[in-house]
Image (cartoon, rainbow, N blue to C red):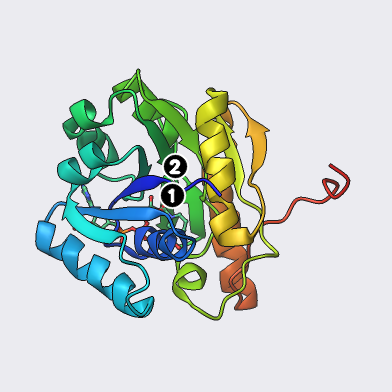
Amino acid sequence: MTTYKLAVIGGTGPQGKGLAYRFATAGHTVIIGSRHTERAQVTAEEITVRLDGDAVHVSGADNATAADAADIVLLAVPFDGHAALVESLRAQLAAKVMISCVNPLGFDKRGPHGLDVADGSAAEEAQRLVPDAQLVGAFHHLSAVNLWNEAAELEHEDVLVCGDNTEAKAVAIDLARAICGRDGIDVGPLRLARQLEPLTAVLISVNKRYGVRSGLRLSGLDKH
Ligand SMILES: NC(=O)c1ccc[n+]([C@@H]2O[C@H](COP(=O)([O-])OP(=O)(O)OC[C@H]3O[C@@H](n4cnc5c(N)ncnc54)[C@H](OP(=O)(O)O)[C@@H]3O)[C@@H](O)[C@H]2O)c1
């Protein structure tokens, strides 16, 4: 198994922490990033304790230090503030594989909905801001609660991966193994993040209506 050195920017939030926990469990080295070093260290410690000390490869740092130290950078921050954050890390992100699970969503009286994004999607916004990074969209549809729940088996879910760089996509496809036990699915180019990101609004709406934590599974790929 290939192991990666990953920075999780916004790793103190539920989604980043949940993904970091799953990646660390699978043996990847994880650096939790935060705007505040101490917050990152607290989350890193929380994951280490959860893994009973087995996860000696989890640490915490400020976002820039984390991104600089890693080979792969996962963006797990809210869309509000996303552009400013990515811009501030441009030097550290240059030429790296960047994976975005950012979902630009709005919530009003009628429920969750996808926001109009000038660049088309959050992933494309990040790509415009760091043109020499290899942007991949993935992990948009996994519930943070499930990721952090030790008992939650996520084998029934698929990780849908989009991107324009085949090697970078291969990394996210491989990382999906840490969560679902099998490769993520290559759905196509980065512009499909315009469909993947707002699709999360559908899942959240279903969750509210049925009182569940829904996930995605594509059919028809069994014989692939
Ligand atoms: N929650 C879910 O179930 C879920 C599922 C799928 C995808 N996602 C996506 O994953 C991303 C993270 O979700 P989340 O629920 O973990 O979000 P969150 O808790 O709102 O934010 C995650 C972290 O981002 C940092 N942050 C917050 N505002 C920021 C700003 N303006 N600039 C820079 N950093 C900021 C904070 O870390 P510090 O204060 O430590 O810097 C925070 O702990 C979102 O884009 C979301 O759409 C979430």
Quick one: label 1 or label 2, which is nearer the N terminus? 1
* Marker disc for residue 115: 2
Residue positioned 44% across, 72% down in the render: 148
Relative image position of residue 220 (x, y in whole percent) = 86, 47
Of residue 76 and residue 47, the one placed in the foreground of this image is 47
Name the residue nearer the viewer: 191 or 76: 76
Q: Position of residue 93 (x, y in %)?
A: 27, 30
Which quarter of the rendering shows the C terminus? top right
Q: What SS does tag 2 mark?
A: loop
Give left or right: position of 143 versus 34.
right
What residue sits 19% from the left and 61% below the top?
40
Label 1 crowd bin: few (<14), some (14–19), many (20+), radius 10 Å:
some
Q: Residue furthest top?
A: 131
Point out residue 192 in the picture as x, y percentages from the top left corner: 59, 31
Q: Which residue is mark 1?
A: 105
Q: Is residue 216 placed above or below 54 in the rendered structure?
A: above
Rendered image quadrant of residue 185: top right
